[in-house]
Amino acid sequence: MSTGGAEIHSVPGSVPEDGGVNMAALERRLLQWGYRLDGKGLRLLAGDGSDRLFYRLRQAHGSYVVLVSPRRKEPIDENDAVWHIGRHLHRIGVPVPGMLHADVHEGVFVFQDLGSVHLYDLVQRGPCRNRLRTLYREAVKVLVRCQRRAWKGFSSTWCHDGSHYDANFVYERELLYFRNAFLEGLMGLQPPPLEVDMDFQRLALKAGEDRFGLVFHRDFQSRNLMVFQGSMWVIDFQGMRFGPPEYDLAALLLDPYAMLPLWLREELVQLYWRHMKDLLGGSYTLFRERLATVALCRCFQFLAAFAYLGMVKRKRDFLRHIPAGWHRLQELLGGDLGAVYPGLCRYLQRSPVFEYLSERIGAAMEAQV
């Protein structure tokens, strides 16, 4: 991993108030940091679900990735989380891209270039069974390393979007998000009945239990894992916070971008448990209950995100992943969780709403073929 002393600078007013990128100011900042610009060295890269911009900066001795993220709020902004959490993870040996220069006020960062191959890209190529197994076992080992080390010295002051995954956060940012963005916003449904909201509240209380200082990434999935020089690397770590480590495992296993087979998911669950049981505490039965609980929350979260990004942000490519995400949700509700949250189960599996949703989502899936 590339190291290097990251420096903080500030150039007030260099980013337009409308959030656009002032390229002249960006180039001045890069020149001040010692990078050479010849008109062809800075190339915009494909973005993700956020509004941040990424550029590849080519130099005679190699290339770097430049993140441009205009500051949006005080006192703690996403840029502060990138700076503090990125340095923390790098310092404790978690494989994250090295941060060479940073200006948290202006919102410009220069990172080590990890190439362009995400775990998602390798999965889409249809690797053989053994190759898929090897990739995901490595991903779990990286996750274990991150979770076993990151909680030590982690500070809530680094978190820009809430520091704890508690009941209020779960209810408002995942469950109501699903209701508002997916059920009502995308599918055009009326608010669900009271029994659904009661189950949402019970689920939020269960998922948001205090885990006594443990931390998690919150978006540990195939598009946030990169494969570079034969190793797995973690990106988009700025959402890390205190909460249930099992959430990250659920995000990896239920990832609608990848749709892992059941045999591999179960193998990875066992691998994770062997390496984490002493830190997690409790029995294997309790671990599986916790995993199922946060997995359900994760399903609601990514379905809501796909709907919001696709419809509100007009990033239509996200909509094509909804059928896979819906399938994962139905798998969970068809198991033991259906009895634990009967109102949710009736509403999403055995009611006219289910038929309506399945018909609409099925039509979308057929349109992709």
Image (cartoon, rainbow, N blue to C red):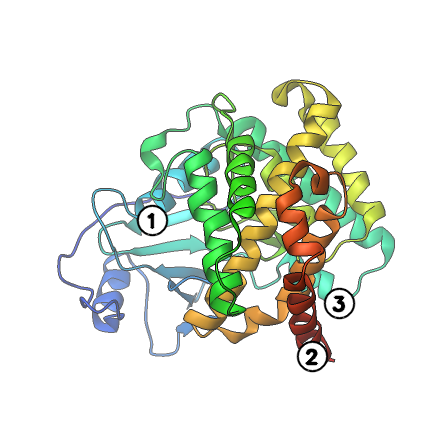
Q: Residues within 10 Å of mark 3 (few under 14, many from 20)?
A: few
Q: Secondary structure at mark 3?
A: loop
- The type of residue carrying mark 3 is Arg
Q: Residue furthest left?
A: 12
Q: Residues within 10 Å of mark 2 (few under 14, many from 20)?
A: few
User: Which residue carries the number 3 mark?
Assistant: 125
User: Which residue carries the number 2 mark?
Assistant: 368
Q: Residues within 10 Å of mark 1 (few under 14, many from 20)?
A: many
Residue at (25, 55) in percent of width and height: 71
Q: Secondary structure at mark 1?
A: helix
Looking at the image, is mark 1 or mark 3 nearer the viewer?
A: 1
| Whether residue 165 can be seen here | no
Say above or below: 315 vs 100. Answer: below
Sequence order check, earlier mark of 1 and 3: 1
Q: Are marks 2 and 3 in contact (CB under 8 Å)?
A: no
Real-space Cα separation, disc 1 to disc 2, in angstroms: 35 Å
Residue at (56, 47) in percent of width and height: 196
* Closer to us: 189 or 308: 189
- The type of residue carrying mark 1 is Glu
* Closer to us: 314 or 94: 314
Q: Are marks 1 and 2 in contact (CB under 8 Å)?
A: no
Q: Position of residue 123 (x, y in %)?
A: 73, 61
Q: Quadrant of residue 338?
A: top right
Q: Secondary structure at mark 2?
A: helix
Q: Position of residue 79 (x, y in %)?
A: 32, 49
Q: Position of residue 96 (x, y in %)?
A: 51, 45
- The type of residue carrying mark 2 is Gln
User: Which residue carries the number 1 mark?
Assistant: 78
Say above or below: 280 vs 366. Answer: above
Q: Is residue 199 left or right of residue 76?
A: right
| Whether residue 334 can be seen here | yes
Q: Quadrant of residue 107?
A: bottom left
